[in-house]
Amino acid sequence: MKIRPLRWAQPAHRRTLKSLLLWWLIPALVFIMLIALWLSNYQLREQVDRAYDRALAGALRSIDHNISTASGGLSLEQPYLMLEFFELTANGSLYYRVATEDGLAEIGNQDLPLPKAPLISGQAQFFNAEYQGLALRIAAMARPMDPPLYNNYGGRVVVQVAEAIDSRQSFLNQALLRSVERDILVILIVVLVVVWSVFRTVRPLERLRQDVEKRSADDLRPVDAPDIPGEVAPLVDAVNRHMSRYTAQARLQRQFLDDASHQLRTPLSVLRTQTAYALRESDPAEIRAVLLAMQDGLDRAVRATNQMLALARAKNASFAEAGLMPEDVDLVEIAEGVIRTLLPAARARHLDLGLEASRPVRIQGIDWLLREALSNLVDNAIRYTAANSEVTVRVYADDRHARVTVQDHGPGMSASDISQATVRFRRGAAGKNKSGAGLGLAIVGTIVELHGGKIVLENRDPLPGLRAALVFTVDSFPDAAMRHEIAGN
């Protein structure tokens, strides 16, 4: 059987932002400009026809003004120079016809075509037609004869003026050519401007890509891209927030590894030495003594490991990705659970471990973290208080604050120890001869800070002992968590 090597799936080809923008913008712009070109050419043709038709209308009115029926017949008093002027105005050959509507009297070019639609008196009508093999533009108008011909029988006289459309079409073609050249030049300029704008717009993104690619694997500094488009800025901000969260996670992991190597190296070395000694020893009493010492060392290593894990979990809980959601918790119920758990340890030292609480005290918080914090305080009190004395846990609240206090009869703490109580691996003067890693109050401080509260340590006066209080603002947890999240980012 042949084992095939694993092959990474090749990512599908993805089109770039530049190609997407150009693919959509340029065809759309060209299409719109072509429509605009067609509309402008159509309007230009109408304007040219209107200008030439205005000249024909002037010739039509001039001829009509010189028609007379006063002599009993149809006559046109049109000087030769006026005809030449009309031909110059029309820029080509001029044709005209004056006739009665029944065609019995006719002057000018015979058989000049009439429009298909009936003429309306006093209104000029323009149309294209062929005459003697030539394409003509004809203007025609009918009006009542005054005075009438044919024994006072009313009728209309029809006046027509026409010109060859060669010169008109030539002028129109030249105008259209210039218009097309201008519009094509505008299209090219617009396309070049769009291409230049697209490349200039995505250039900051290309610089951003190069900046990220040049970074080393452990360079998690925020991405600085002040010139990127506003639409991309939220994405860069999201990447920076993600990198910040990853940096915090990596820092916690490094810190946990440093703590573990710091706290476990010595106990493991001692256990190894003790194991080697026990293997060499033949006296059962000596072997038992070594095993008891090894058991004590293992207990200390287990306690230190559990505390480091609790501290790491507490710090990691400040991130939303941990899936931790604040809920309504009862501090009295938490205190009862902690006391039941640690009651055997208190009885082993003949301590009176009690709870003072009159009613439920509820805050928004994370149940297991609060239990961990209170367990550390009560455990410290049990370990440091004098034998045959008492440890008291009190839970109470007012309008603004909820408090959980743990009071013992131990040696207390100096002012210097209180000010540095939450520093990791630091042990006060009272704990020099006690087992522990110096992480208990650091865990408590981290958890209380996450909940927007504070830890207050004070010596009992005049009685001996220490009073440790966890103080929470009743409605501050959501804001405090948000501040902690922002500070972490």
Image (cartoon, helix red, strand yellow):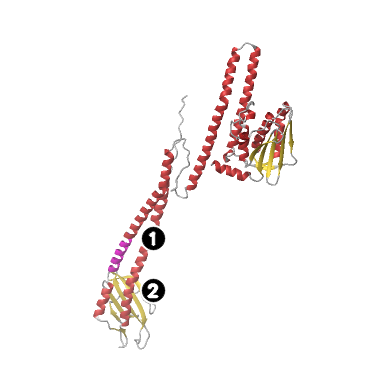
Observer able to see residue 19: no
Residue at x-position 72% and y-position 26%: 348
Residue at x-position 32% and y-position 82%: 65
Residue 377, located in which quarter of the rendered image? top right
As rendered, which of 216 and 26 lies closer to the eye? 216
Q: Which residues are magenta?
A: 166-180
As rendered, which of 426 and 81 lies closer to the eye? 426
Viewer-nearest of labels 1 and 2?
1
Q: What residue sits right under mark 1 in the picture?
A: 36
Q: Is 375 displayed left or right of 69 in the figure?
A: right
Q: Which mark is residue 117?
A: 2
Under circle 2, the secondary element is: loop
How many neighbours does mark 1 have within 10 angstroms: few (below 14), some (14-19), or many (20 or more)? Answer: few
Across and down, in percent, residue 13 comes to: 43, 41
Residue at x-position 62% and y-position 37%: 447
* Label 1 or label 2, whichever comes before in sequence order: 1
As rendered, which of 234 and 160 lies closer to the eye? 234
Q: Farthest front residue? A: 462
Magenta span has 172? yes
Residue at x-position 36% and y-position 60%: 37
Under circle 1, the secondary element is: helix
Is 31 situated above or below 375? Answer: below
Q: Amino acid at mark 2?
A: Ala
Magenta span dominant secondary structure: helix
Across and down, in percent, residue 434 comes to: 64, 26
Across and down, in percent, residue 450 comes to: 61, 40
Q: Amino acid at mark 1?
A: Ala
